[in-house]
Image (cartoon, rainbow, N blue to C red):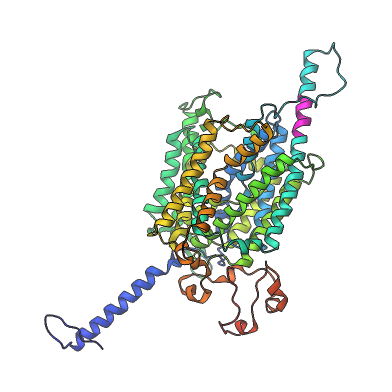
Amino acid sequence: MEDNKTNGNTMTSKEDIMLMENEDTTCKAEVESDSKTPEQLLYKITDNPPIYMSIFFALQQVLLSLSGSLAISTFVADVACASDFPDIKTDLLSSTMFMNGVTTLLQVTLGIRLPLFQGATSVYVIPLLALQRLDTNFCSVQGFSPSATNESATSNMTSTYEMESKRRLAFFRLQEFQGSLILVGIIHCLVGLTGTVGFLMKFIGPVTIVPTILVGGIFISRSSSKFAKAHWGISAVTACTSILLSLYLSKVNMPCPAWSRKKGFHVYWYPLHRVFAILIGMLVGWAMAAVMTYAGALTDNPNEAEFLARTDARAGIITDATWFRVPYPNQFGAPMVNVGFFVAFLIGTIVSILDSIGDYNACARICNVPPPVAHGINRGIAVEGICSALSGAIGCGHATSTIGANIGAIGVTRVASRNVFLWVGLIYMLFGMVGKVSAVFITMPYPVLGGAMIIMYGMFNGIVLSNLHSVSLSSTRNLAIIGIAILVGLMVPYWLEKNPHDINTGNAYYDSIIKNLLANPNLCCGILACFLDNTVPGTIDERGIGGWLKPYEVQRSQYSEGQEVYMPLIPKKWLSNKIMRYIPFCPFQSRKLENGNTNGDTPSLI
C-alpha cells in the first residue's frame, strides 16, 4: 500500500488505515448508488405492478394522449371536408381510439417491446393541412352534386342537395386517405422487414435524431398554446400541481392505507403523489374549471376562447354519443389512391421513421436499458407499417407512430412497466367501442389539456436532449450542425407560412409539392442535420454513434435491464437456429452465448 503523507508523517496508524478503508468503502458505495439510475424507476420494463395500480397508471397515460388523438381526429375531419357532420367526426374519433389500442398492443407484444404508446400522429396530417391551405377549392362540391335537380326546387331542397354533395365529398376524401395509407403502410412495413432501418442507423446518429425530434417538440408548442389560451390560470394550476408533486416532492413518501391477510390493516409509505402527478394535476385543473363554471366566472359566449374552459362547453357530446360501436374496415367505402395524398403520406412516413428511431432511443434512455438493437428497431418499424395499413383500412384518415409525450410521462411517473401499456391498449379499445365512456373524457376543458401538455412535452424535450450524452458537446462541429439544423427547421416553415406566394415555379402542382415539403419542420431539420453529419469530417465517437455500437458487455453494468427486453416472443430454442442470421427482424444467439459464454454472437445495433 502506498504511504499516506500527512504533515510530513510517513507512517500511518492502524486506526487511520481502518478509517481510510471505511471511507473508501463508503465513497464506493455512494458512487455506485449515484451511478445506479434504476433506483429512480419505481417499476422497470419487465416488472408487474398490481393490477389495480397498472390500471391507474394506464388510465393516466390514456388521459395524457387523449387530447392529441382528439386534435388529430378533428384535423382529419377538417381536411376530409367533414366538419359539418358530427356523425362522421364521431366515427373518426371512435376509429382513432380503437386503433390506438390495437396498435399499442401490437407494438408492445410484437414490435420493439419497449413501453411505448403507438397512437395517432400529426406527421401524416400536417402535409394534408398544407395542401388544404394551398388549394382554395379543396372542399369544393363542384362535380359531386346530384345530377337530378329541379329548377323549381325550394331553398330547403337546394340546401339538402348541397349537404348530400358535401357528405359524398367527405366520403370520397376518406376513401382516398384509406387507399393511400394502405399503400404507404406496406412500404413502411417493408423498410423494417428488409432491415433497411438497421443499415440506415450507420448514418443516422444522435446529431441527426436529437435536433429533428426536438424541433417537433418545439413546434408542437403552437398546438399546446391553442389549448392553454382558453384560460391560462387553469393551465398554470394544472402544470404547477404536476411539477410540485413530481419534482419538488419527488423525495417524499406519503402514507397509504392497505390491508392484507398477513398484516391486516396497515399503513405503508409510497410516493403515490409522484406516480400520479400528471393525473392529479389534471383532476385539480378540472375541479377548478368546474368551480369557476358554476360560479359564473367563465364566459358563456361560445364565440370566445374562454368558453372552452367551461366543463359544460361540450356536454352535448355525451348525449349524442352512441353506447356501443365497433369500427370496421371500409366503413366509409372502398379504398382509392390519390397521388397527391400518397406523396404527402410518404413524406409523413419518412419523418415518422426518423421520429420513431428517436423515440426508441429516448424511451430506452428513460427506462435505463441498452440502446435499441437492430432486430428490435427493424421489428418496431415493421409493426408500425402494419399499424399504418390497418389504420388506413379502418378509415382513421391518419397513420400511427410512437408518441413522445407518453415517454415524457414515464420520466415523470418513473413507471416503465410494459404491462401498463398493455392496459393502455385495452382501455383505448374499450373507449373506441363504448362511446359514452370516451365522451366523458373528451369533454375535458381545453386549459386542463393545455396544462398537461406543458409538462408532458417539456419533459419529453428534456429526454430528447439526454440522447446527446454520447455526443462530444465540446466539438464545434457537433454544436454547429445541431444549432444550424434547429434554426433552419424552425425558420423555413415560418417563412413559408408568412410568405406562401414566394415559391412560384409557374406550375401550381409543383408549387404545392415544394411547399408541402418545406412546411414540415421535422423534414427540413432532419435532412439538413443528416447531410451535414455525414459530410462534415468527424469520428464515430465524436458523432455519438460509437456509444450505440459498443459491445453490450461493456455497458451492461450501468443498466437496470439488459437487451433481453427487446427479445421477440418466440421460443428460445429458435434463437440458436442459423436461419436467424438472415432474418433482419429476429435476433441470433449462438449456443455458446446460451451456455454463459459472452463471446458468442450478441445482438448488436448494426
Residue plotted at (60% across, 39% down): 71
- Left or right position of 384 against 305: right
Residue at figure coordinates x 49%, y 74% from the top left? 556
Drawn side of residue 355 relative to residue 583, left or right: left
Which one is in front, 345 or 255? Answer: 345
Inspect this view and state whether residue 584 appears.
yes
Name the residue at 42% across, 45% down. 241
Q: Is residue 588 magenta?
A: no
Q: Which residues are magenta?
A: 163-171
Give how far across and how far down residue 59 sits, in percent.
57, 51
Quick one: quadrant of the N terminus? bottom left
Q: Is residue 602 above or below residue 145?
A: below
In this orientation, which residue lies closer to the viewer: 420 or 312? 420
Q: Predominant secondary structure in magenta?
A: helix
12 relative position to 492: left or right: left
* Location of residue 587 (image quadrant): bottom right
- In the depicted structure, whether residue 504 falls above or below residue 127: above
Q: Nearer the viewer, residue 373 or 489?
A: 489
